[in-house]
Amino acid sequence: MLTCNKDRVKNKIETFSMFGDAGSGGITRFSLSEEALKAREEFVKRMSAVGAEIVTDDMANMYATLGGTDADFPRIVMASHCDSVRNGGNYDGILGVIAAMEVIETIVLEKISHRHPITAMIWTNEEGSLYPPAMMSSGVVCGKFDKAEMLSSKSSQGKTFGEALEESGYVGDALNRFNPKDYIAMLELHIEQGPVLEAEKKKIGVVEGVVGMVNYRISTYGQADHAGTTPMSYRRDALLAAASAIKYLHTELDKLDSNLVYTTGEILCHPCVHTVIPDLVDFSLDVRHQNPEVIRQVVEIIKNMPKTFDKCEVKYQEAWARNTIEFNKELVDLVQKNADAYGYTSKRMYSGAGHDAQFAAEIVPTTMIFVPSKDGHSHCEPEFTSVEECWRGINVVLQTVLEIDMGA
Ligand SMILES: [Zn+2]
């Protein structure tokens, strides 16, 4: 079967790892920063060299397109992001852009005839590291976020995303936006960002969708009193109550499906003084599962939890929720077929993390392909996927693009 070039893949990984190199194995490459602009320049250089036409849209999303034999055919796009979190790794996002470039280069260099235009794309500001929220530009283009609101998103230094956008020099025409009329499919290759593929010795993750989630805020209300003069039996300690509530929730949630994941990652304690018994604690509960029925059971558990713990009242409030996104079934099956055809072991799975592809999926047939993450690490400098593993994933993207083109 046709494969892409491993040396070229290695060269791209090494080259892009320099843009934002933090000197300790990873990168810090915030969207539209000087480092991110260097990555964009490299993308332009490589894509122009093989004759792709490059445009940007009004959110500075970049599109490098190789014309097909039929100019009227809709495009097949491969897309991801080139920005990172602070002290992030060399694979999250950029691997999908590297894959897109490598597929286009292979098609040109191997002189493969194709009917559809084929596009390599960079989504702007996926991480939302400087300018929240995450997946900002795919959110705007796919109708999830209000553009004016996004332009006013401010960094901690007080600069707005709109200002950064103007300064970048990459603002193009809104008419160039990814859209359901001109696009037939979107593929995103990404690292798994978790330990499952490596642990189960699978090479390819055939991604069926992105898990739904609910995010709750839970508060406990006690009485602030002196830490030295208040006997234990007189206290209403909101932090003790929060600990009891967290333990209760873990015990109950563990009775549900084993694929359920839940996290308390944020906790606020008032007044947070070592000589005062806390009177208010507020904590987050992030819960994710692909099956809406399991999420419904989670919500039942939260609603039915005791109204008081340790003499403190407990209140809860939904902060936000997102439904499970199912990727296009035909594309998922095509990815599976091609992973099998190359002889790569694979696993069907859902993404626990959010990706641009989840917004894209709502307007254009979309799917994702995962490759293993060493020790499951991601959003950190030790993030690693071998050249060989990246190359296998890109081969699956290549073959899938060619079969979409043939109308498979
Ligand atoms: Zn990513």
Image (cartoon, grey):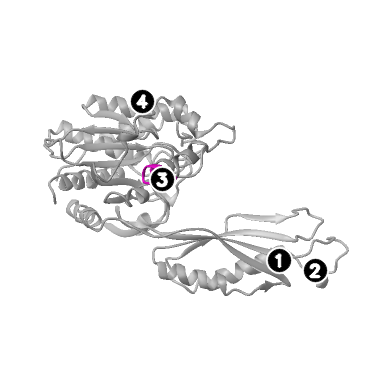
x, y (%) of residue 292? 41, 67
Q: What is the spatial separation of the Cα atoms under label 1 and label 2, in whole angstroms? A: 10 Å
Tell me what residue is drawn at x 20 percent, y 33 percent. Answer: 66
Q: Which mark is residue 41?
A: 4
Residue type indicated by callout 1: Leu
Q: Find the distance from the CA under tag 1 to the CA under tag 4.
A: 54 Å
First of labels 2, 3 by sequence position: 3
Disc 4, disc 2: CB below 8 Å?
A: no
Q: Residue at x 30, y 24 (%)?
A: 45
Mark 4 or mark 3, which is nearer the start of the sequence?
Answer: 4
| Amino acid type for the residue under numbered disc 4 | Glu
Q: CA distance from mark 3 to mark 4?
A: 24 Å
What residue is drawn where x is 59% and y is 32%?
Answer: 157
**What is the number of the mark on residue 139?**
3
**Image check: 163 left or right of 181?**
right
Name the amino acid, label 2.
Arg
Q: Are marks 3 and 1 in contact (CB under 8 Å)?
A: no
Disc 2 or disc 3, which is closer to the eye?
3
Q: Earlier in the sequence, mark 1 or mark 4?
A: 4
Relative to 214, does residue 141 appear above or below in the rendering? above
Q: Compare residues 301 and 146 and report the one nearer the observer.
A: 146
Q: Which mark is residue 235?
A: 2
Instruction: Out of 220 and 184, give the one closest to the viewer.
Output: 184
| Residue range corresponding to the magenta coloring | 138-145
Looking at the image, in which quadrant does ligand 1 appear? Answer: top left
Query: What number of labels is visible?
Result: 4
Tell me residue 155's x, y (percent): 55, 35
Mark 1 sits on what residue? 240
